Image: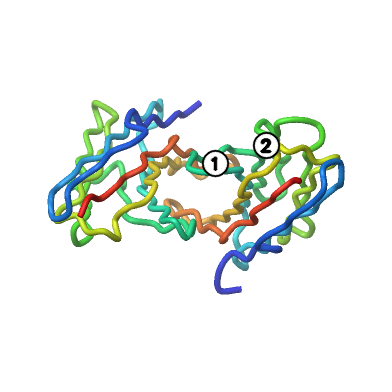
Amino acid sequence: AQTVTQSQPEMSVQEAETVTLSCTYDTSESDYYLFWYKQPPSRQMILVIRQEAYKQQNATENRFSVNFQKAAKSFSLKISDSQLGDAAMYFCAYRSALKTSYDKVIFGPGTSLSVIP
Amino acid sequence: GAGVSQSPSNKVTEKGKDVELRCDPISGHTALYWYRQSLGQGLEFLIYFQGNSAPDKSGLPSDRFSAERTGGSVSTLTIQRTQQEDSAVYLCASTGQGVGTEAFFGQGTRLTVV
């Protein structure tokens, strides 16, 4: 079974600085998708970024980028020029790309990010 | 609908009472998930429905918890004989069939057992 690990329960960053959130996963599959979700205090989960495993190029969305290391099964999220609105819980997630009847999205335990003014 | 809808948004109940939480997923989404989230904590997986397959109930914490999904759409999570430790936010999510599509979440139901 696949697992997702986030080893940093809490992180903090100075406003305007850069922070990297770690995520590792375990799978025997070769084709899958990885996601980072943001959950602000409003508790509405928002998709931040998505990465397809067969694409070597790291995904980027404005100030958010990932460092995807497939061999190491690592998928870290980098937030540049951190803003107060980035303060939230961040979840890493995995979903198989196999078209089977069981492709449950697997979430990591989350990292709580604080932004210091 | 346009998004995942959950009701009620807040529920206060007395210890020992039964509660029902409702989730209306995005139209056409075949997979539906229930999670529990305590304050400041991560997502605790409860149950997963996928199409006509048998649901994955491996996350249900006790037999007081049950869920059903009628007609492959709306789902109801029922908690019987509620306890104070059941107090949490209950989140519902749904995913479409497309490969690599993300999970869409509702706003959650905040359950408080007094």
Q: Amino acid at mark 2?
A: Asp
A30 or A40, which lies in front? A40
Q: Where B51 sits versus A11, above or below?
A: below
Q: Is residue A108 left or right of residue A65?
A: right
Compare residues B52 and A19 and report the one nearer the observer.
A19
Q: Is residue A48 left or right of residue B34?
A: left
> Which residue is pictured at 33% across the width and 36% down the height?
A10
Q: CA distance from mark 1 to mark 2?
A: 9 Å
Amino acid beneath label 1: Lys
Q: Please state if A16 lies on the left or on the right of A27 as rendered.
A: left
- Which residue is label 1 attached to? A104
Chain identifier of the residue bearing label 1 in the image:
A
Residue B48, given in percent of the width and then of the height, sits at 64, 43
Report the residue at 39% width, 51% height from top.
A37
- Marks 1,2: beta carbons within 8 A: yes
Q: Position of residue A99 (x, y in %)?
A: 51, 45
Q: Work out which quarter of the rendered image holds the C terminus of chain A and state it.
A: bottom left
Reply above or below: B1 against A112. below
Q: Label 2, on which residue?
A: B56
- Please provide percent x and percent y for residue B80: 84, 42
**Residue at x 22%, y 50% (from the top left corner):** A116
